Image (spheres, rainbow, N blue to C red):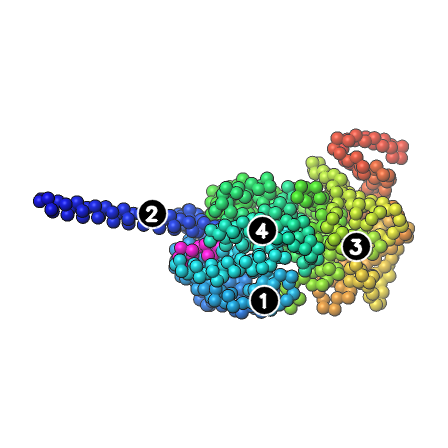
């Protein structure tokens, strides 16, 4: 080869090498770019792992198939992005809500199935939202303290963005740079600004509303790698101060303490035990943005160690929430809580999956996941599916538990006692934000998931447009939040703290003691000193398992000490058919309300009588089971059969019954009661088994400042004595007292023998 040809050959070779290097360089850049998305919830590595397991993980495969069928039907029916006009439950509200779910699911399907039709569906709908959103004024409905644009309140706008940010992450690389710029400039950034800097009264606070807002701004910020939005989400709007006296629609302060941002929303509402101060219903609701944004932060900004924040309270909160459910998985309706909400809700699927994946792989969580029969279509859902496939599942065991309230666990709490099928829920917590009720030292009682003594919950028909647009009804304030709506003492027909949030939010009850070590007797006791100035209430409740009784029973001691004479009303909100009483009563021909305000205006009086014996006895039947109430009575005690529903022309309230024990003109007093579950009835054989109470007598044999002693005598004449220490109730305290010439010595909070 001559020199000229040789040079040409070398140049050609060099060109090839350069081109090859350039091509390799481009390929590496593209690979790096591709690996960045999805990154938020479903990750690029997660997609690879899921695809490798498809067809081998039944619960995941079944969930995927159901979601695919759902979204295929949505695609077939076409995209609808209507102009907003309705409240909750209305067409436009429901359609936009349906869209946010469809977008998130379609994005996931695109990644897992690698089918472009799902990406195109997400892109096309987002472009329609881009075209619509830039034309929208505030929502035409004016009821909310913070109006959205797509929805009547910023809260629902935030819901939309939390889900849609996940969809955007999944199709990020499917879109061109021009398309991304269009969406981010005209839709996502303006959207994030509206629910935050344009609506500080919604965003800049500690509340479940702002948690959704923080998560929405933060998640879209993570997808777009927008540091300003991420910081705004974590720490709130910089250098902004709100009116500390301003309130929201529910009467709660918007920002009394100046705290804001996602981290503050973790720090303030959660106790160290994971109890959320608004109660389980709103913990479930806020749990989704808490956990899904935390997962996004974990994936994109692992240096924050978000699941370790406040000693790992987010993961602790899931265990607390699962324990705040009955035998059927329904959450106890503390504060504003809708009955029937349960761990079958999609938010709890998220909670269980995230807790298992990022927590300690508790096999009991797999037991819940199997009952839910679905998993998330992401990395955490894969972990759960593999755990179930590998046979790691165990039942989730609920035991008696005491959950503290308050940021430092020093603001009361909720005690739950469980024995066999019986569950006692005792609330001695703080106010619970604007969703709290005025119900210090109240309780509810369950048997095998069925309410025996109920907590009313909220007054609202969520997302049913015909009932107040699906929003809170006025009866939530006039009835559901009032003290008389709960199983606790009401003094002088006035609610605790006069029913005023400004007062109630400053106080909380205090734990006296909690004991669940002895399987035969479990006790919780708490004190309230602020609900009525000058009056102190000490309530001690025990579940007792006694071989002389068919089932465990409840002992309830409410000790009231007051500087003045008062009227005390003590209700029992039972369910079922009245069977028998040991007192005579009259039933009026015309029903009249029990009172004129503070909830009393909503109670019809269906019967009234006087206590006759030392014990008042009342029995009823519900769901083919028998129940008996035995309560200590004074000679002048009135007994009132009432029913909810007075002054309720729109039938917004349930027509539930109650028996109210009324004690007038009294300073210091004590209410002592037992509730037994016993026997059963068969409508098939028409036979009633063990239909009567096993308690013959219930007596207060000692009641001093330091001790209260109760004797319980069964129908066979056998007597047991329960003594509770009213002052020094530490586990180490030694006690020695004399009752009726008998000495009793013990160490600890109580005595029972």
* Label 3 Cα crowd, 10 Å radius (few <14 / some 14-19 / many 20+): some
**In this orientation, which residue lies closer to the viewer: 127 or 625?**
127
Q: Number of callouts in the render?
A: 4
Across and down, in percent, residue 238 comes to: 58, 51
User: Residue at (85%, 42%) from the top-left corner?
Assistant: 700
Q: Of discs 1 and 3, which sits in the foreground?
A: 1
**Mark closest to the chain's N terminus, 2 or 1:** 2
Asked whether, in this view, residue 571 is left or right of residue 194, the answer is: right
* Label 1 Cα crowd, 10 Å radius (few <14 / some 14-19 / many 20+): many
Query: Please, what secondary structure does the residue beneath circle 2 have?
Result: helix
The answer to the question of whether label 1 and label 4 lie on touching residues, with beta carbons closer than 8 A, is no
Examine the image and state in which quarter residue 516 appears. top right
Whether 645 is drawn above or below 524: the answer is below
Query: Please, what secondary structure does the residue beneath circle 1 have?
Result: loop
Q: Quadrant of the N terminus?
A: top left
**Mark closest to the chain's N terminus, 2 or 3:** 2
Region in magenta: 166-175
Across and down, in percent, residue 329 comes to: 62, 50
Residue 213 seen: yes
Work out which residue is located at the far left of the displayed protein and give it: 2
Residue carrying label 4: 238
Examine the image and state in which quarter residue 555 appears. top right
**Mark closest to the chain's N terminus, 1 or 4:** 1
Label for residue 498? 3
Residue carrying label 1: 139
């Amino acid at each position: 080869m001559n020199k000229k040809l040789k040079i040409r050959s070398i140049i050609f070779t060099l060109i090839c090498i350069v081109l090859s290097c350039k091509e390799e360089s481009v390929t590496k850049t593209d690979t790096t770019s591709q690996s960045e998305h999805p990154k938020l919830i479903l990750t690029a590595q997660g997609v690879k792992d899921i695809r490798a397991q498809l067809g081998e993980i039944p619960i995941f495969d079944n969930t995927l198939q159901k979601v695919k069928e759902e979204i295929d039907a949505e695609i077939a029916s076409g995209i609808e992005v209507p102009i907003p006009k309705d409240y909750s439950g209305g067409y436009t509200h429901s359609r936009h809500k349906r869209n946010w779910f469809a977008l998130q699911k379609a994005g996931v399907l695109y990644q897992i199935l690698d089918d472009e039709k799902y990406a195109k569906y997400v892109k096309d709908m987002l472009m329609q939202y881009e075209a619509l959103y830039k034309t929208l004024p505030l929502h035409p409905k004016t009821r909310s303290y913070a109006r959205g644009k797509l929805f009547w309140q910023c809260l629902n706008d935030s819901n939309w963005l939390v889900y849609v940010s996940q969809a955007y992450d999944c199709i990020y690389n499917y879109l061109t740079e021009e398309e991304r710029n269009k969406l981010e400039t005209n839709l996502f950034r303006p959207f994030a600004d509206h629910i935050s800097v344009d609506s500080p009264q919604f965003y800049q606070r500690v509340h479940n509303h702002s948690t959704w807002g923080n998560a929405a701004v933060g998640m879209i910020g993570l997808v777009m790698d927008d540091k300003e939005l991420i910081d705004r989400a974590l720490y709130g709007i910089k250098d902004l101060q709100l009116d500390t006296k301003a309130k929201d629609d529910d009467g709660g302060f918007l920002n009394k303490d100046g705290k804001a941002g996602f981290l503050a929303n973790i720090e303030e509402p959660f106790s160290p035990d994971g109890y959320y101060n608004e109660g389980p219903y709103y913990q479930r609701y806020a749990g989704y943005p808490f956990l899904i944004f935390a997962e996004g932060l974990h994936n994109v900004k692992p240096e924050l160690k978000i699941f370790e924040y406040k000693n790992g309270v987010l993961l602790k909160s899931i265990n607390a929430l699962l324990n705040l459910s009955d035998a059927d998985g329904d959450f106890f309706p503390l504060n504003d809580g809708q009955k029937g909400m349960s761990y079958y809700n999609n938010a709890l699927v998220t909670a269980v999956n995230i807790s298992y994946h990022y927590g300690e792989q508790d096999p009991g969580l797999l037991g819940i996941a199997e009952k839910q029969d679905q998993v998330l279509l992401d990395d955490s859902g894969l972990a759960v599916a593999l755990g179930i496939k590998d046979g790691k599942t165990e039942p989730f065991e609920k035991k008696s538990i005491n959950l503290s309230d308050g940021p430092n666990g020093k603001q009361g709490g909720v005690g739950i006692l469980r024995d066999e099928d019986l569950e006692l829920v005792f609330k001695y917590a703080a106010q619970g934000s604007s969703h709290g009720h005025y119900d210090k030292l109240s309780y509810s009682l369950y048997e095998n998931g069925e309410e025996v003594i109920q907590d009313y919950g909220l007054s609202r028909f969520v997302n049913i447009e015909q009932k107040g647009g699906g929003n809170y009804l006025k009866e939530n304030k006039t009835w559901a939040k009032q003290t008389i709506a709960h199983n606790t003492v009401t003094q002088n027909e006035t609610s605790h703290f006069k029913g005023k949030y400004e007062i109630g939010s400053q106080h909380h009850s205090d734990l006296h003691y909690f004991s669940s070590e002895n399987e035969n007797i479990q006790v919780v006791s708490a004190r309230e000193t602020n609900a009525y100035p000058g009056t102190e209430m000490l309530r001690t409740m025990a579940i007792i398992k006694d071989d002389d009784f068919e089932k465990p029973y409840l002992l309830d001691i409410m000790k009231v000490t007051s500087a003045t004479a008062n009227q005390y009303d003590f209700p029992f909100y039972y369910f079922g058919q009245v069977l028998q009483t040991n007192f005579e009563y009259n039933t009026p021909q015309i029903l009249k309300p029990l009172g004129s305000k503070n909830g009393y205006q909503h109670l019809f009086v269906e019967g009234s009588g006087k206590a006759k014996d030392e014990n008042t006895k009342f029995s009823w039947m519900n769901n083919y089971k028998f129940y008996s109430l035995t309560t200590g009575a004074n000679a002048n005690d009135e007994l009132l059969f009432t029913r909810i529903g007075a002054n309720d022309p729109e039938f917004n309230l349930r027509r539930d019954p109650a028996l109210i024990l009324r004690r007038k003109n009294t300073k210091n007093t004590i209410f002592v009661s037992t509730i037994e579950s016993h026997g059963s009835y068969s409508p098939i054989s028409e036979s009633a088994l063990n239909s009567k109470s096993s308690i013959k007598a219930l007596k207060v044999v000692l009641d001093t400042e330091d001790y209260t002693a109760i004797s319980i005598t069964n129908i066979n004449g056998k007597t047991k004595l329960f003594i509770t220490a009213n002052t020094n109730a530490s586990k180490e305290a030694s006690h020695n007292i004399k009752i009726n010439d008998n000495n009793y010595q013990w160490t600890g909070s109580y005595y029972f023998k």
